[in-house]
Amino acid sequence: MKKRILFITQDLGRTGSEMVLWYLLNNLDKDQYSIYVLCMKKGELFDLLPDHIGKEIFYKSSPNWYKRAFRGLLKVLGKNAVAVQVDRIMRHFKADIWYVNTVVIPDVFEASKNYQVKVVTHVHELPGAFALIKGQALKSIFSYSDVCIGCSEIVCEKIADFGHPDIRLQHSFIDASTIQVDADRIAQIKKKLGVLPGDFVWVVSGATSYMKGIDQVLPILEHFKDEPIKIIWIGKQLNTGLDFYVQHIAELKYPGKLLFTGALSEDYYNYMSVANGFLLLSREESFSLVMLEAAYLGIPIVAFNIGIVPQFLQKEMGIVIDNWSMVDLLTGMREFYEHRGYDVEKLKSNALKYDVQQQLPKFEALLNNVANSL
């Protein structure tokens, strides 16, 4: 008998947690599972779901104006629109399991108590992200989740600290087959950015936030101010005061050394390949897919001791910086700037351990085990 699973997720965009779910949805055996997907917003992969998968968007962000209007009416009547929408789905889909992807969708957990349904929550966050939701919401997430899946060992440890009784590990992963680069395009990008033949380029990937370490580029630029080093920051600019401060100081004191690309899609890996080294400056990372992408491209890595860094980053691949030491970070960067050796093949082969071809069978087996046990 088929298991019926309602997947609840943010948007099916191209972020790490959404891509991991995307691979699973496209590969689950439709003879074993009936699948329905409910998204908070419509991401770019939403319309590309296979035809056998039912799907819809939260009323709040629905592209249909009458559904948004209906939500407004529900609010006027004092009703919870999410609960009403989930109730309608449950009446026609009758899910056995709710699979909630990430903890930033807290509204659905309270609604689950109204049904004979098991809840699986895939946790991609560490405590820093818990600040995005209310304390009672976090309590509900762990109270109503029958199973919690962590995307890394450190995430599983944090869930265990909370006392949850059933925790599973499923690493996030990349799709190496999509990581393609074009040497001619890379040369064009270097010219566009003003990267000279003698420059040493570091790349950082992520939104320009304090959590991602945007402020840390200023002491790096100061340290290397008299040397041909540039930093390329790939990712969405948040246009905060911190953004403005860092960009203003960089332009004033270190002109041409800090380059922002904004968010990228098609050219992402070509921009990454401009780099001689990859920096992971984040204060907290549950996993770090971008580090795996850099490794697959053969780029040596200097990273703080976060996420899967201590398990992944081995000798001849890069340097792990303990205790958030800026002195050690600068020392590690200088070693590669002064031509410390590294092993491109080792970087690539280690990244492939976290490739979809290796991890997806494990993910499917985990879900089969969870579904049968529930």
Image (spheres, rainbow, N blue to C red):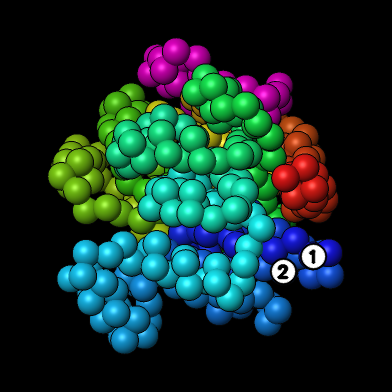
**Vertical relation: 129 (above or below) 269:** above
| Residue drawn at the location 70% of the way across and 59% of the way down | 24
- For marks 2 and 1, give the CA distance: 6 Å
Q: What span is in magenta?
A: 310-337
The crowding category of the residue bearing disc 1, from other C-alpha atoms within 10 Å (few below 14, some 14 to 19, many at least 20), is few
Quadrant holding the N terminus: bottom right
Q: Residue at x 41, y 15 (%)?
A: 325
Residue in front for this viewpoint, 294 or 81: 81
Image quarter where the C terminus lies is top right
Left or right position of 293 against 364: left
Q: Quadrant of residue 160?
A: top right
Residue ID for mark 1:
2
- Residue 53 in percent (x, y) is at 66, 75
Under mark 2, the amino acid is Ser
Q: Determine the residue positioned at 46% across, 59% down.
A: 10
The front one of 105 and 264 is 105
